[in-house]
Amino acid sequence: MTSNPDTRASVSVLLDENSVTVSVPAAVYGREAVMGAAYVFIDRAYVLVDAPADGHHTVRLRGRSPLDSDGLAGLGGELGNELLAQQLRHLVCERNRHVLEGVVGGAVSGAAGPEPAEEFDLSALESMEFDDEAFEDPLGIAMSWEDKYGNKRASKKEAADMKEAAESASKEDA
Amino acid sequence: MTTAPGSQVLRLNASLYPRESVESATNTLSDFGTFSIENDGDYITVSVQAGDDVDPVELVGELANFALANTLGGGSN
């Protein structure tokens, strides 16, 4: 089995320096993944990230407390696992970026409340002059019913005739 | 580059560590030593002179950690 040296990762332990250096290809692990993975270890080690010109990122972890060879190798192994997790997280975020932006955008716009209603332009009313004189009403819209059609009431005779007609109609029905 | 006796040098890749993050880290640790920042091609070189009763190796390590944290957190604080 042959492998391309440009995509090969390596771990080197320097016991006398109490450090382990992990070198990973930049084509496989992006800058964000490397920096994010290195940050996880700042509570246990002094971390230095570098990017040599050969297309690799290197992360050097120097233990805060003295570590033996197995401890340093284990630290490097944990960094490798964290690199994989960070790179996967980065890929998932990139792949679902439009979904995340949609959800966050909807939440923010919902919290902002409804858009203000369109305001009517009432400036024309300020130029109008109101006084006690009546408006011109050529169609008689503002007139009352009585003024327009008169107060027509049935006379007593008409009322008696209507009552008699109603009674005769009810007798015929019976 | 010449360094004063007892001083340490930290070289940070300028493509990974913004200068603002490094300057902020030195400000944070200014009580524990003195720092001198210089641009050196693709790297930012920080000369560290540890204060009294301060381990210079430990101070350089903390400086690298603070620079990394500032880089990921925006670099200003």
Image: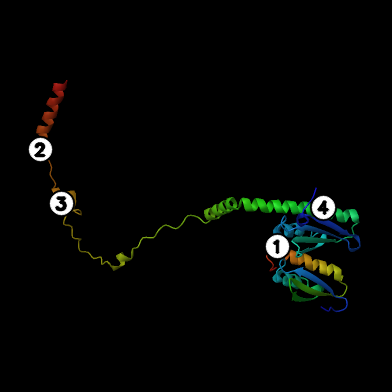
- Percent position of residue A58, x then y: 78, 61
| Residue type beneath disc 2 | Lys
Depth check, front residue: B31 or B61: B61
Q: Quadrant of residue A139?
A: bottom left
Q: Are marks 4 and 1 on the same chain?
A: no
Q: Position of residue A85 (x, y in %)?
A: 73, 51
* Viewer-closest of A155 and A135: A135
Is residue A104 shown left or right of residue A52? left
Crowd class of label 3 (few under 14; some 14 to 19; many from 20; radius 10 Å): few
> Taking A53 as reference, is A163 left or right?
left
Q: Is residue B30 visible?
A: no
What residue is at 79 percent from the left and 53 percent from the top?
A80
Q: Which residue is mark 3?
A: A147
Q: Which residue is mark 2?
A: A156
Q: Which mark, by number, is residue A77? A: 4
Residue at 29% x, 68% y is A127
Q: As displayed, is residue B28 above or below residue A40? A: below
